[in-house]
C-alpha cells in the first residue's frame, strides 16, 4: 500500500470543516435544476446498499442528514448538502439497481454522466466499495466512466468492521493496485467503518485538502 499520511494541520482542518454547520440543500433529477457553480464539490458514488448514507452521516457527525434505508436504491437523485458554505457534498444514486425499472436506471445513468461531464466545480468523486465484497463489475463500470469523463476519484472501503484486519489489509492492497491502472484514480485507498467510526479523521482531512 502507498505510504500516505496526513499532517496534524490537515487533520485539524478536516475536523473543523465538518464540525461546522452542514445542511441539506436540494435534490436534483434534471441537469437544469443543478445549483449554480460556486463552492467546490465532492461526490459519493457506490453500489446500492454500500453504506453511502451511513458514511455521509458519520463523516458530518449528523445522524439523520442523509436518509438511510434497508431498501437498496432508495437514493434516486443527486442530493446536495452544504458544508459551512465552503463545500457541497453530493450523494449520487446507488448503482446496481436490481429492483429498478430499466428506463429509470437509464435516466439515472444519464443524469450521472451529464453531471460528471458538466460540473467544473467537482473536485473528486469518492467511490465506495463494500469491504465484504470488493470491487464488482458495476464498480469497474463506474471507474471506467470516471476515467472517460476525466474526473478525479478515490476508493473508500466501507463496513471495515465486518471483516478481519488481515482481510481488509489484503483487500486494500488489491484495490490500490487496481486503482494505479486507472488514469483518473487517486492511488490511496481509505478504509472506514461507519459503525465503529474508523477512518473518518483521515477522510475528513482528505476532503479538507480539496476546498
Image (cartoon, rainbow, N blue to C red):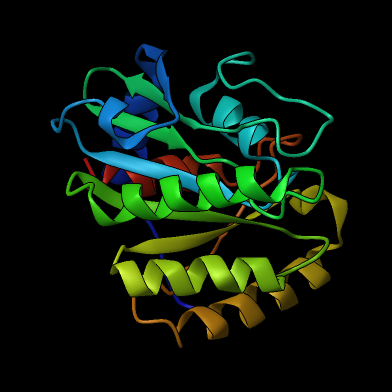
Q: Position of residue 78 (x, y in %)?
A: 46, 33
Judged left or right of residue 106, residue 211 is left
- Can I make out residue 30 in this image? yes
Is 163 placed above or below 53 here? below
- Looking at this view, name the residue that lies furthest to the front: 103
Judged left or right of residue 80, residue 108 is right
Judged left or right of residue 173, residue 37 is left
Q: Residue at x 43, y 45 (%)?
A: 111
Q: Nearer the viewer, residue 111 or 154?
A: 111
Q: Residue at x 31, y 67 (%)?
A: 149
Image quarter of the N terminus:
bottom right
Q: Nearer the viewer, residue 113 or 180?
A: 113
Quadrant of residue 156 within the rendered picture:
bottom right
Q: Position of residue 51 (x, y in %)?
A: 70, 40
Is 69 placed above or below 136 here? above
Q: Position of residue 194 (x, y in %)?
A: 69, 37
Q: Residue at x 59, y 25 (%)?
A: 57
Judged left or right of residue 38, residue 2 is right
Is 20 placed above or below 6 here? above
Is 86 placed above or below 50 here? above
Q: Residue at x 40, y 62 (%)?
A: 153
Image quarter of the C terminus:
top left
Q: Nearer the viewer, residue 194 or 133?
A: 133
- Can I make out residue 1 in this image? no
Q: Position of residue 59 (x, y in %)?
A: 52, 31
Amino acid at each position: 500500500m502507498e505510504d500516505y499520511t496526513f499532517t496534524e494541520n490537515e487533520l485539524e482542518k478536516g475536523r473543523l470543516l465538518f464540525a461546522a454547520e452542514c445542511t441539506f440543500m436540494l435534490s436534483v433529477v434534471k441537469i437544469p435544476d443543478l445549483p449554480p457553480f460556486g463552492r467546490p464539490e465532492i461526490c459519493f458514488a457506490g453500489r446500492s446498499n454500500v453504506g453511502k448514507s451511513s458514511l455521509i452521516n458519520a463523516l458530518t457527525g449528523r445522524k439523520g442528514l442523509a436518509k438511510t434505508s434497508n431498501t437498496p436504491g432508495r437514493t434516486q437523485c443527486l442530493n446536495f448538502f452544504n458544508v459551512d458554505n465552503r463545500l457541497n457534498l453530493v450523494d449520487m444514486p446507488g448503482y446496481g439497481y436490481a429492483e429498478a425499472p430499466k428506463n429509470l436506471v437509464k435516466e439515472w445513468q444519464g443524469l450521472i454522466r451529464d453531471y460528471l461531464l458538466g460540473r467544473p466545480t467537482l473536485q473528486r468523486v469518492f467511490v465506495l466499495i463494500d469491504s465484504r465484497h470488493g470491487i464488482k463489475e458495476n464498480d469497474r463500470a463506474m471507474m471506467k466512466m470516471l476515467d472517460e469523463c476525466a474526473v478525479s476519484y478515490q476508493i473508500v472501503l466501507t463496513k471495515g468492521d465486518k471483516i478481519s484486519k488481515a482481510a481488509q489489509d489484503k483487500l486494500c492492497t488489491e484495490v490500490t493496485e487496481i486503482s494505479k491502472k486507472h488514469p483518473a484514480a487517486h492511488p490511496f485507498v481509505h478504509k472506514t467503518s461507519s459503525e465503529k467510526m474508523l477512518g473518518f479523521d483521515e477522510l475528513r482531512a482528505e476532503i479538507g485538502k480539496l476546498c
